[in-house]
Image: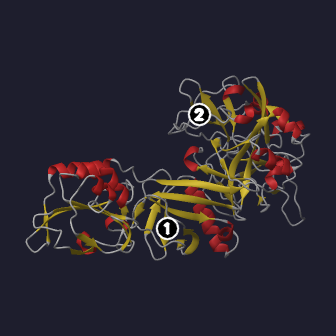
């Protein structure tokens, strides 16, 4: 059955799906098996989905506003598959496979899925992720999957769910020297403010995108566009943004950024001072003076301590800017997309003068950017005026080495979400115990099986690299909020001490045949393509599993 013409909302239309046969549903379970109309005005053939606060009323054969739940013959069914990570023992990597229950997989036009049987996904080699699992809304329900397994003889429980995150954002690291915009500048998407520029880091520009104030604190349009953008960015699609007072950019996780229509190639080897220090010995004897132009710290070789230690003759060069320490200058120009992240196009424009008592005709000067992408070679004439000359081959080799030492320009996207709220009730009836256990490293938190960093302090604030998560890990609900997978793994004894929902624990073998206990995590035949990343296996080398 193909689901289409969603009720309302945002997101992409789902692919065709094969939901489980409603006759297989356990009638003794009254959670989400068949949603009942909440009011007399709702048509009898519609069902109400309570997987999020929107409470969509879904007609037969249609999906809700999030594209994730459907009405098949009066039964509420999950359209997406639950994704299980299977450990590839031969290669030591993990493979994402869809959980299809006891139905055969469909062949895809572009993918050849692995053959599945109940014995292939062995308990000790499989990890059920929150991707496709369903939520705990309206928050009193235990998590849809509470999975028991063994790891090196230790009984382990993994609590699996999807979180509905209003408090969430992306921290985006863009490896480039290009000036993207002033710190605190607004980031705009489709006319709406969706984030801001934050503090630059070494060789990278940093953005903060999304967050609760943009999702819920502004207009309905701002929230909708922010939510759509966050889903696309988290799912590794390209997004187009403008920065007020700065650049127009296209960014995509795992790809080089495009700044004002130009694809970036490299991040800098270091600041101008660092480049001077790294390559000083190589330049010595080949050129009399070297200036590495940088928006932050511009370096002058003969004045720099590295040049002095090499007994290089002072050149008498004086440049614009504020002197920090010998050979290191701040603010030689304004930020921009020119040389070394400045706004200059002619590197000679930063030269103030030459000291005639120290400079001499024939003095050679190399000026280069921090990435080596821009470089010019000069020789002083009788009037101590720099005259551009071809770059000698020996010096070009060093410039090429600067380029070689610059890492490729890349966009990194980290999801940051607050999991300290109601989803904890899906783990235990006493949520503070879960928070405390995580801080004591008794519980390992993953997102789609990917390792997550837990911020210190109160609550459960998780941060995870979207490139380590399965593809299309993020969904949305039109509240608006982001839906993301999250898993909590711990020893069975620790779970019991947390006051966990012990009656809902199932083995992986049971889950493969019966699915989620509340029946709205029904698998389908959509295939998740195998990924080649090297994520740590979620059970491997974790202190609490010792």
Residue 542 place in picture, x, y as percent: 68, 35
Outermost left residue: 382
**Is any atom of residue 181 visible in this view?**
yes
Q: Which of the 4 image quadrants contains residue 53? A: bottom right
Q: Residue 241 — which label?
A: 1
Identify the residue at image location x=49%, y=64%: 200
Residue 538 place in picture, x, y as percent: 66, 36
- Give the camera-side residue of 7 and 196: 196
Q: Which of the 4 image quadrants contains residue 338? A: bottom left
- Give the camera-side residue of 419 and 544: 544
User: How many residues crowd mark 2 within 10 Å: few (<14), some (14–19), many (20+)?
Assistant: many
Q: Is residue 382 above or below residue 306?
A: below
Identify the residue at image location x=64%, y=68%: 224
- Give the camera-side residue of 205 and 129: 205
Q: Which residue is mark 2?
A: 94
Residue 300 place in picture, x, y as percent: 29, 63
Q: Is residue 193 above or below residue 120?
A: below
Element at badge 2?
strand
Outermost right residue: 28
- Counting residues from the start of the chain, the first of labels 1 and 2 encountered is 2
Q: Which of the 4 image quadrants contains residue 380? A: bottom left
User: How many angstroms separate mark 1 from mark 2 (CA)?
Assistant: 34 Å
């Amino acid at each position: 059955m193909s689901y289409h013409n969603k009720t309302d909302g945002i997101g992409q239309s789902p692919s065709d799906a094969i939901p489980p046969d409603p006759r297989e549903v356990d009638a003794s379970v009254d959670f989400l098996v068949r949603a009942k109309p909440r009011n007399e005005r709702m048509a009898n053939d519609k069902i109400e989905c309570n997987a999020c606060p929107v409470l969509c009323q879904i007609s037969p054969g249609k999906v809700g506003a999030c594209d994730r739940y459907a009405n098949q013959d009066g039964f509420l069914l999950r359209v997406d598959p639950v994704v299980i990570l299977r450990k590839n023992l031969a290669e030591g990597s993990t493979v994402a496979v869809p959980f299809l229950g006891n139905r055969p997989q469909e062949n895809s036009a572009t993918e050849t899925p692995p053959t599945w049987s109940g014995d292939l996904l062995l308990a000790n080699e499989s990890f059920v992720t929150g991707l496709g699992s369903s939520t705990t809304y309206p928050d009193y329900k235990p998590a849809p999957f509470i999975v028991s397994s063994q790891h090196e003889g230790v009984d382990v429980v993994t609590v699996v769910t999807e979180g509905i995150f209003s408090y969430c954002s992306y921290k985006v690291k863009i490896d480039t020297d290009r000036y993207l915009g002033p710190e605190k500048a607004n980031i705009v998407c489709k006319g709406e403010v969706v984030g801001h520029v934050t503090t630059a880091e070494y060789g990278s520009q940093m953005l903060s995108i999304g967050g609760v104030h943009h999702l819920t604190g502004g207009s309905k349009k701002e929230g909708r566009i922010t939510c759509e953008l966050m889903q696309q960015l988290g799912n590794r699609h390209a997004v187009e943004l403008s920065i007020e007072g700065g650049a127009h950019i296209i960014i995509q996780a795992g790809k080089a950024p495009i700044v004002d229509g130009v694809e970036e190639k490299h991040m800098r080897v270091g600041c101008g001072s660092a480049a001077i220090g790294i390559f000083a010995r190589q330049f010595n004897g080949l050129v009399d003076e070297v200036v590495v132009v940088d928006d932050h710290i511009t370096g002058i070789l003969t004045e720099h301590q590295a040049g002095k230690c090499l007994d290089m003759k002072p050149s008498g060069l004086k440049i614009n800017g504020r002197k920090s320490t010998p050979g290191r200058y701040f603010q030689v120009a304004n930020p921009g997309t020119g040389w070394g992240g400045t706004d200059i196009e002619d590197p000679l424009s930063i030269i103030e003068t030459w000291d005639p008592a120290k400079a001499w005709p024939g003095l050679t000067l190399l000026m280069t950017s921090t990435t080596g992408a821009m470089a010019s070679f000069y020789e002083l004439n009788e009037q101590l005026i720099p005259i551009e000359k071809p770059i000698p081959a020996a010096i070009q080799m060093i410039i090429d080495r600067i380029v070689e030492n610059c890492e490729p320009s890349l966009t990194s996207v980290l999801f940051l979400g607050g999991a300290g709220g109601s989803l904890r009730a899906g783990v235990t009836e006493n949520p503070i115990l879960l928070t405390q256990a995580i801080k004591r490293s008794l519980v390992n938190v993953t997102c789609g099986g990917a390792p997550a960093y837990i911020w210190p302090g109160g609550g459960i604030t998780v941060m995870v690299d979207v490139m380590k998560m399965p593809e299309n890990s993020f969904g949305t609900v039109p509240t608006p909020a982001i839906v993301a997978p999250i898993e909590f793994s711990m020893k069975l004894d620790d779970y019991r001490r947390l006051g966990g929902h012990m009656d809902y624990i199932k083995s992986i073998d049971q889950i493969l045949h019966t699915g989620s206990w509340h029946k709205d995590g029904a698998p389908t035949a959509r295939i998740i393509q195998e990924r080649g990343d090297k994520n740590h296996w979620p059970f491997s080398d974790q202190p609490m599993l010792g």
